[in-house]
Amino acid sequence: MAAYFTPELFRFLSRLKRNNDRDWFQSHKHEYETLARDPALRFITDFAAPLYKISPYLVADPRPSRGSLFRIYRDTRFAADKRPYKTNVAMRFAHRGKDVHSPGFYLHLEQGGCFAASGLWHPEPATLLQVRNAMVSRPGDWRKVRKLLNWDDATRLSRPPRGFAADHEFVDDLKLRDLGSAIEFTDTQVCSPKFMSLFASACQKMAPLAGFLSSSLGLSF
């Protein structure tokens, strides 16, 4: 089996980082399509079968827009950073009809910073409360999956959230505002013909946490 991604992908993204403007991108759009977009869509298409074995409730949607592939265009309407393009390739495998905040799987490809992840990043307060209530009401289930938490950049409260005891067994977890697991890949691994199986294996390892978070939100997994 041939690799989906090549070192040229990372070279393109590195050049885009140095030339992040519309004129440069338009003149190199064919490179984006052949090195990034099209291989990513093939990867998404082929990941549907391995994903189904992990969870039949998550979707690998290969549509060029509004599917699993994130747009390369940044939303700069309310951002101080007006650079128009993202300098990574990203994919999400979420519950059908749910957005990126679904506790499914995420793949991030960027030179020197490739990883798979699963969890909830900056969820709404009501969503976070559901997860915290599940931790407390299902302590045995949470003990089995909490060891998977490893987001170094997760934000947390300085005090226990209102309504939860300061001496609770899971007080440090209850303070978290972001909950998730990540597994890193080297650029070489991403460019290997074995990357599909590496990514599927990573998702399988993170699946228990994704399952707990999904069930706490009333989602099947």
Image (spheres, rainbow, N blue to C red):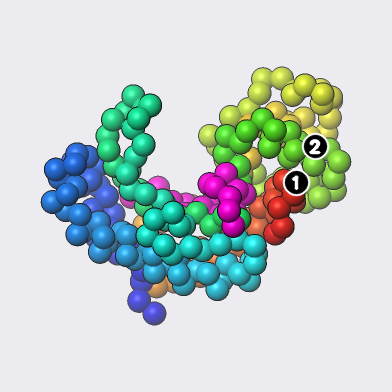
Question: Looking at the image, is 46 positioned above or below residue 96?
Answer: below
Residue 79, numbered circle: none
| Dots 2, 1 in contact, CB < 8 A | yes
**Could you tell me which residue is drawn at 82 percent across and 26 percent down?**
164
Secondary element at image label 2: helix
Residue at the spot of label 1: 216
Residue type at numbered disc 1: Ser
Could you tell me residue 193's position as x and y percent? 39, 73
- Distance from disc 2 to disc 1, alpha carbons, whole Å, reads 8 Å
Residue type at numbered disc 2: Asn
Asked if one can make out residue 118 in the rendered structure from this viewpoint, the answer is no
The N terminus lies in quadrant: bottom left
Q: Counting other residues with Cα less than 10 Å from the Cα at mark 2, is it few (<14), some (14-19), or many (20 or more)? A: some
Inspect the magenta stretch and tell me whether residue 51 lies in it.
no
Secondary element at image label 1: helix
Residue at the spot of label 2: 133
**Could you tell me which residue is drawn at 66 percent across and 52 percent down?**
210
The image quarter containing residue 162 is top right
Residue that lies at the very extreme toward the bottom in this rendered image: 1
The image quarter containing residue 185 is bottom left
Tally the numbered discs: 2
Inspect the magenta stretch and tell me whether residue 106 lies in it.
yes
Q: Counting other residues with Cα less than 10 Å from the Cα at mark 1, is it few (<14), some (14-19), or many (20 or more)? A: many
Could you tell me residue 20's position as x and y percent? 22, 39
Question: Looking at the image, is 131 positioned above or below residue 90?
Answer: above
Q: Give the range drawn in magenta.
A: 96-117
Could you tell me residue 63's position as x and y percent? 41, 62
The C terminus lies in quadrant: bottom right
Question: Looking at the image, is 27 positioned above or below residue 170?
Answer: below
Could you tell me residue 65's position as x and y percent? 39, 55
For residue 195, side relative to residue 33 (left or right): right
